[in-house]
Every structure is written in C-alpha cells, then in structure tokens.
Amino acid sequence: MRARHYQHPARLCTRWLLLFLGWISACGSHVMYVDFLGSSSRCTRIPRNMALCYDIGYSEMRIPNLLEHETMAEVIQQSSSWLPLLARECHPDARIFLCSLFAPICLDRFIFPCRSLCEAVRNSCAPIMACYGYPWPEILKCDKFPADHGMCISAITNGTSTSRRTVPRASCKDCELEEANSSKEILDTFCANDFIAKVRISKKNMTSSTLFDFDMDSKLEILKHDPLAKADVFPRLQQWLDLDATCVQNIMRGTRLGIYVICGEVQEDTVVVNKAYSWQKKNKNLQFAVRKWKHHKCRS
C-alpha cells in the first residue's frame, strides 16, 4: 500500500483524550482495566518518529504494549506499516483503535479497546486491506476484546448517526483527475460510463468526526443518467461524496473549491466515479465535448 495525504487528526485526538480522561475519572462504562502489569512494563514517551501515535493526545505509553512488542524499535517498525491504511481514511476511529494497542496510555493498568470499536474499524478497513491482498490480522481479532457492557475504549464516531454524515468507506480504486487530452477521448469516456454530471464540490474544515468533510452544490448539471432516474443522481453522488473520501480528495488535489465533470458507473446500490475532469476556461477540449455531447451518438 502506498501512503498519501496522511495527516495527524489533532482535533479528533484531543477530543478523544478529554473524553477518555473523563471516562476514567468518572469510572464510567467505557474503560476496561487489566489488573496485572508485568514487572518489565514501563512508561516511556511516545517518540516523534512513531508517526502512527505521536501527538495522539497523550505523551506517554506503556511498553511492552498490548501487542507484546517489547522494544520501541519494534513498536515503530510494526506501527509504521499501518500508516498507508490511515491514508485511505477507511475509518475516522482507526488511529484511536490502533494506538490503544500499539501505544497504550500510561496508567497503572492496561486499557483495551471495546469490541464494537474493533468491529467498526475492521468492517470499514478490512475491505481496503483486501484490495492489496492483506487479510485482517489474527492478532486484531475482535472477539479478543471486551464487549461494550465492560469498561473499554469505545468509538468516538457514530456511524449510525441520524445526520447526513456517515463513516467514510474508501474504495479500492485510486481515482485521479484526468487530463482532457482531446475532445474525442472525452466523448468516448462519456459513452463508456453510466452517468455524467458537472458538479461543484467544496472542502470544509476538518472536523472531529471525519478526516475530510465535503459539500456538493445541489444545482448540478446532469449530462447522462442511465440507468438512474434523473432525480436519483444527486442523492447517489452525495452518497459517493460522503463515503469515498480518498477518491474525492484525489480529485480535488488539495484545493478547497472546484467544478468538475465526473463520470462513473452504477454498481448495485452505489455509484463509482471512474473519471473526473476539472472544469476550467483553459480546458477547451472538455468544454467542446460537453457542448457536443447533446448531439453525440455513441458507437455500439
């Protein structure tokens, strides 16, 4: 897996730490204590080169950790292999879950993640790992962790929230912004896809519940919508915007606002964006292709 766009979600981590310490002080139902700590267990500062958990919201961790890594060199080496998965933004609580195991907070007892937290991260991230031929590791098998009625670290993000925002689930496809090399090539792409729409997308500030948050203007121009009903295009594209954070981030390439012509296909109850073009005045080939599309006949 290739790491891209990795950022430390500091706001998320600070909020988690405050909640976490609140749970401990209140002796709530979110923290599971393991009474025994081996004589070799010690507190140590989380080093800057442990990118997975540095600046997570607390500064010291226990070693050996909950994955039985006995040296900091081993912790750093093993934890770094998870950075590409975080770069895919497969679940906003993935870093919390992993750091609870790789870098358990330095208290007089170990604290485990809840089983529901493990399951939520696994359900979102395991399919992405499978894209690259990696199974969910046995050492992270979720039934090893305490059920939620115990005291454990639970999820921050509520994937079943009644709000529009849902847990982002990145796709296997690394979609990118295309170059509009020729109008013929663009028209051939239009013919090959189920739907085409001209959309305006804006990137909002990072929030505590998702790494990236995007908005789409509802006044989109629909050029093609087979096999969808025209009224279904916007809701389906809004679903894509919510769930495939990696694809949207790749298309926007660090910009905060843009107009794009996107093309894709319908797969069961979701849409998959295959191609995207930036709508700019200098992009004459794209403008010509969009104008010509109304009268263009695709070759069968």
Image (spheres, helix red, strand yellow):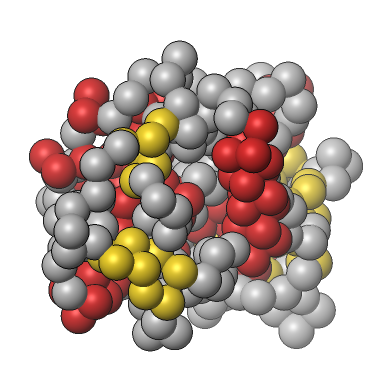
Depth order, front residue of 37/62:
37
Q: Residue 200, image x and y in percent? A: 79, 55
| Residue at the spot 30% in from the left edge and 37% down from the top edge | 35
The residue that appears at 50% across and 45% down in the rendered structure is 93
Give the quarter of the image for residue 27.
top right
Spot occupied by residue 292 in the image (x, y as percentages of width and height):
69, 57
Image quarter of residue 126: top left
Pick the residue in front: 28 or 256.
28
Left or right: residue 87 compared with residue 207 = left
Regarding residue 35, the answer to whether it shows in the image is yes
Looking at the image, is 104 positioned above or below residue 1? Answer: above
Location of the N terminus (image quadrant): bottom left
Q: Is residue 6 visible?
A: no
Q: Quadrant of residue 279?
A: bottom right
Q: Position of residue 141 (x, y in %)?
A: 19, 34
The residue lying furthest to the top in this view is: 149
Residue furthest out toward the right: 219
Residue at x-position 17% and y-position 64%: 40
**Front-most of residues 107 and 191:** 107
- Which residue shows up at 55% across the image and 65% down it? 58
> Which residue is outermost to the front?
39
Left or right: residue 162 versus residue 108 is right
